[in-house]
Image (cartoon, rainbow, N blue to C red):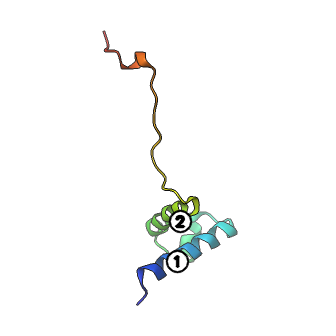
Amino acid sequence: MLSKEQVKNGMFDKISAWKQRGLTQKAFCQQHNIAYHVFHYYYGRFRIKENDKPVSFIKLQLPSNALSPLT
């Protein structure tokens, strides 16, 4: 049985292969018998690892008059 780390590393290897081949995500998943939602989960984790920072929200700045009550 594979450990979680081995599964993650295997999926990261597959995502790297997908990026090199130029296939659509759906076609790649079909060719490699990977559930599409599983691919997306690991792709999100891969992007975080690739950027060394989590994807997060950005601060939204509104003009001061946008907060005034409607009349």
Disc 2 marks which amino acid?
Answer: Phe
- Mark 2 neighbour class, 10 Å CA radius: few under 14, some 14 to 19, many 20 or more: some
Q: Which mark is residue 46?
A: 2
Q: Is residue 52 left or right of residue 64?
A: right
Asked whether residue 32 appears in the rendered view, the answer is: yes
Disc 1 marks which amino acid?
Answer: Asn
Report the number of discs.
Answer: 2
> Which residue occupies 49% across, 52% down?
55
Q: Secondary structure at mark 2?
A: helix
Residue 9 location, x and y as percent? 52, 77
Give whichever of discs 1 and 2 has the lower sequence position.
1
- Mark 1 neighbour class, 10 Å CA radius: few under 14, some 14 to 19, many 20 or more: some
| Residue at mark 1 | 9
Q: Secondary structure at mark 1?
A: helix
> Which residue occupies 35% across, 15% down?
68
Q: Is residue 14 left or right of residue 55?
A: right
Q: Residue furthest top?
A: 71
Asked whether residue 33 appears in the rendered view, the answer is: no
Residue 1 location, x and y as percent? 40, 90
Q: Which mark is residue 50?
A: none
Quadrant for the C terminus in the image:
top left
Residue 27 location, x and y as percent? 58, 68
Distance Cα–Cα, label 1 vs label 2: 10 Å
When the figure is inspected, residue 59 is found, relative to residue 63, above or below; the finding is: below
